[in-house]
Image (cartoon, rainbow, N blue to C red):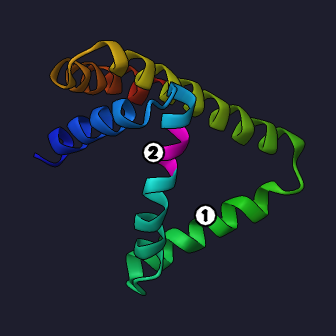
Amino acid sequence: LSMSVYAVSVKLYGSKLQLTPPEMSLYNNCVSLPVLALLACTGSDESQNFVDKVRSDLLGCSDSFLCIAVVAASCFGGYCVSVAGFSAQQVMSPTSWLALNNISKIPAIIIS
């Protein structure tokens, strides 16, 4: 149910605000930041483990050019996938977009 509400909401807001796919990607990322911050600040063991893991990954990466290049390439790839998804969403119904979104997760998991 939440994925359906999300898909319809994104389609409506994108159309209403006349956002381009790159703007929709930025908007989508900004909308998720408060939820991530809330999860990180709950003080539970899981959230603390998550924060510690991210911190150690980032600090451990700061000395290695290769590691920074891999993280940057991953970020760029994620951005490209996001923009492609929002481009597809503009020409598809929310139901078709959800189906495409779910089907494309299989190759993404295999590639990861």
Q: Position of residue 43 (x, y in %)?
A: 42, 87
Q: Residue at x 64, y 38 (%)?
A: 75
Q: Residue at x 55, y 35 (%)?
A: 23
Quarter occupied by residue 86? top left
Residue 80 within the magenta-colored segment of the rendering: no
Question: In the displayed structure, does residue 69 sit left or right of residue 107?
Answer: right
Q: Position of residue 110 (x, y in %)?
A: 41, 24
Amino acid type at image mark 1: Val
Q: Position of residue 40 (x, y in %)?
A: 47, 75
Q: Which residues are magenta?
A: 25-29
Amino acid type at image mark 2: Asn
Q: Which residue is mark 1?
A: 54
Q: Which residue is mark 2?
A: 28
The numbered dot on residue 112 is: none
Q: Residue at x 73, y 38 (%)?
A: 72
Quarter occupied by residue 79? top right
Q: Is residue 27 above or below residue 58?
A: above
Q: Earlier in the sequence, mark 2 or mark 1?
A: 2
Q: Secondary structure at mark 1?
A: helix
